[in-house]
Image (cartoon, coloured by chain):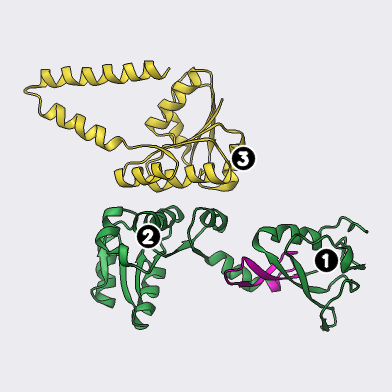
Amino acid sequence: MYIIVVGGGKVGFHLAKELVEANHEVLVIEQDSTRAKEIADELGDIVMEGDGCEATVLDKAGTKRADILLAVTGDDEDNLVSCQVAKERFNVARTVARINNPNNEEIFRILNVDITVSATSAILAHIEPELPTHHLIPLMKLKGSGLELVEVRIPDDSGIVDQPIRNIRLPFQSLIALVISADGQPKVPTADTVIHAGDEVVAVTMHETEEQLRDALMSPLPARSF
Amino acid sequence: MRVVIMGCGRVGAALAGDLSREGKEVLILDTDPAAFRFLPDDFKGTTFVGNGLDIETLEKVRIREADVFVSATRGDNRNVMAAQIAKHIFGVKVCASRVFDPLREEMYRNLGLRTINPTRVQARRLKRIIEAPDDEAANVIVGEFMQQDELMRQEGA
């Protein structure tokens, strides 16, 4: 595959190195000439000096035939524009952006960047199980379906404590797949399964309805009974 | 009408002044509080220190209630990113940006932003004054430019 890496900082450099070792055709676009030379000394003639947001530079880089463009500079706005130019002008099939401000994840998705990678989110996902905060922990994304698996520990004050699952108002396309009780015993729930404080619940949900699911499972309001 | 302007350089500040004089509700954002010195003395709007790329800042300045968002910082990428956030996340109807790179300007215009590219006009004007036979003739041409700008301003008002 032909892969263009925009930004030759630490992330870009190590990424390029790995990709070269995996026998991909790689080009790093780096604005700073000193840094560009350093990378060339280490990795060989795979560096182009220039601004990876400029259409003329991307044109010279042969972006038309690139399979993937990875924008990994330290500035989110530069990464966004680089991906958008690659997509709009050169029809690159897959654009990947590094995101420094995790708030931008949603924005980049709406603005057509295919994949975003946020170090903050990645680290949070790893440490979240250790944190006593009441959040949904993303377990995995089910590729292409827009569905994902999430895990949540039911807080003591949740409105669904001691209620059967049938009383929980789950958002559209959400499903409780597994309930693990405080003693570690997992069970596949039915509509009559009663949720207890401290239960771990594994659910399938749409990315868009994640927040509604969190409210349904964790908010202290009493669940509506039918 | 409520207008939010990001970037209080000379252009952002002059625009803020013009709109404020017309009685519009103007809020101007800049990351550097010292930038507000460019604002004219009769500016009646609000200044806000913050980054227009940051969702939380945009919410603080009530971007949802804005009719117009303008980005005029020195960075093309910052300008188009902020304008796209205003348009696509917060639904601001009119989003305008200054973009120095002509190719990027054209692309984002095609993507639905209102953009201007000052570089071409300025290059053409610079060329005209260096081609003038002497300084006096050059000054006459600059006078013509100013007349053209004033005419445009009056038409716009």
Residue A217 image offset from top left, x and y in percent: 80, 63
Q: Are discs 1 and 2 less than 8 Å apart at CB? A: no
In the image, what residue type sits under mark 2? Asn
Residue A59's place in the image compared with A45, above or below, is above
Do discs 1 and 3 share a chain?
no
* Mark 3: secondary structure: helix
Give the labeled residue for mark 2. Answer: A91
Distance of mark 1 from mark 2, alpha carbons? 47 Å
At 28% across and 19% down in the image, what residue appears? B148
Please state, as top left, top right, bottom left or bottom right, where the N terminus of chain A lies in the image: bottom left
Q: Which residue is mark 1?
A: A155
Image-quadrant location for residue B99:
top left
Residue found 74% across the figure and 60% down from its top = A172
Does residue B89 appear left or right of residue A71 in this picture?
Answer: right
Q: Mark 3 belongs to which subunit? A: B
- Residue that numbered label 3 is attached to: B60
Chain ID for label 2? A
* Residue A135 painted magenta: yes
> Left or right of A164: which side holds A146?
left
Identify which residue, A149 or A133, lies in the foreground. A149
Image coords of residue A22 (percent x, y) = 37, 83
Disc tally is 3
- Identify the secondary structure beneath mark 2: loop
Task: Give the chain coloured green.
Answer: A
The quadrant of the picture occupied by the C terminus of chain A is bottom right
Q: Specify the amino acid type for callout 1.
A: Pro
